[in-house]
Structures are given as structure tokens and as C-alpha cells.
Amino acid sequence: MKNEVIVKYNEILESILIKYLFVEDIDEILYLATKRYEEIEKINKAKNCDDKNICNDKKKKKGKTNIDVEKEICSYTVNPNLRKALVEFYEMRESIKKPILTVGTITRLFNKLNKIAKNDNEKISILEKSIINNWQDIWELKNDNIKKADDSTQKRKNYCENVNTPTLKGQELEDTILSNNDLDKF
């Protein structure tokens, strides 16, 4: 039925346009008109949801994929503390409306944990930091920041100790500066 309508529509267009355009232009216009008609039909079907398959396809894409998270976690590690941290991370992801829906996602999480952590204790610390901050991903712990801050504080202290500050105050300082007439010493 649809193809018959399209064919009749194209014949009418062709008979009208042949008077005004070249044959190459008519073919292009007919092609574009056919495409546009098909697009409009798809949009109308999606709006009305007359075709149940279209509606079901949308639900399938947005629906949850059932994976056995506990099974995946148990196959990843035997450490009960790490298992607990992974389950808590999974539950936190669900609570922030960013659930882990596929086996591939959880596998990538495990691979990333293996890359950035040396042992199970570091993995637990990384997961706990993500849980506390409601992060949907995991990142390497930054312990170097504390050491860098201590080093910069020590450098500032050493710099201040090496600066020659005058011990004179008030009028004595002013008289000394004026008498020496040399500001480079201070």
C-alpha cells in the first residue's frame, strides 16, 4: 500500500516538474521526496506507537540488563573485604542512577582496578574513595600531594630564614635608611 502511494505521488510530481526542470533534477527531487516521505512515516509511527515492535524496541534499549554481579565479583576475587567494597560500589552506582548494566562494564572496572592498584588493600581504598565521593568511576589514589605540600612548606621556611630582615623599628629604621641613603642593603 505504501509503495503504491509513493509511486503515484512520484508520477504526479514528475508530470508537473517535467515542464520546469531538467531530467537529472527531477530524479534527485523524486529521490529526496521519497526519503522525506519515509522519514515522516517513521516519525508518525513512533509518536502514535501503533506498531508495538517500535515501542518494545525502545523499552529493550532502555531496560536493565540482568547480570549476576555477585557471581562476577566472586569470580574476580576471593578477598571478602574486596568483595564487600565492590558490592558497595555497585550499590552506590545504582543509588546515583548510573547502574552497571553489562558484564563488559564490570569487566572493564576490574581491569582498571588491576592497572591502578598494586594489591587488594589499595583496591579497597580506591573503591572506598569513589563510594564516599559518589564517583561513577575509579581513579588512582594521590598520596604524592601530601609530600609535595610538605616539601613546598619547607622550601618557604628555608627561604624566609635566608632573608636579611632589619631589626630596627620606627624612627631608628628611618634614620638609618636616610643616613645610609642606600636602599639596596634592606
Image (cartoon, rainbow, N blue to C red):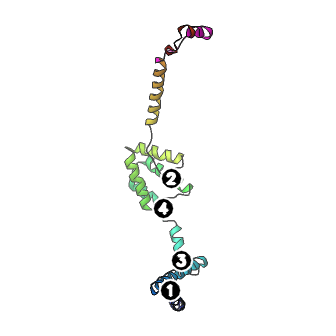
* Residue 88 on the magenta segment: no
- Amino acid type shown at disc 1: Leu
The alpha-carbon separation of the residues under discs 4 and 1 comes to 55 Å
- Amino acid type shown at disc 4: Leu
Disc 1 to disc 3: CB gap under 8 Å = no
User: Which is closer to the viewer, label 4 or label 1?
Assistant: 1
For disc 1, the neighbor class at 10 Å (few under 14, some 14 to 19, many from 20) is few
Taking the spot 50% from the left edge, 86% from the top edge, the residue there is 21
The alpha-carbon separation of the residues under discs 1 and 3 comes to 39 Å
- Amino acid type shown at disc 2: Gln
Residue closest to the eye, 32 or 142 = 32
User: What residue is pinned by disc 2?
Assistant: 136
Secondary structure under tag 2 reads loop
Precedes in sequence: disc 3 or disc 4: 3
Precedes in sequence: disc 2 or disc 3: 3
Precedes in sequence: disc 4 or disc 1: 1
| In the image, residue 12 above or below residue 90 | below
Q: Which residues are magenta?
A: 162-177
Check residue 54 in the rendering and tell me which mark sits there, or answer none. 3
Taking the spot 61% from the left edge, 79% from the top edge, the residue there is 48
Secondary structure under tag 3 reads helix
Residue closest to the eye, 54 or 186 = 186
User: What residue is pinned by disc 1?
Assistant: 21
The alpha-carbon separation of the residues under discs 3 and 4 comes to 22 Å
- Amino acid type shown at disc 3: Ile
* 15 with respect to 76 (left or right): right
* 127 with respect to 50 (left or right): left
- Picture coordinates of residue 53 (x, y %)? 52, 79
Residue closest to the eye, 117 or 77 = 117
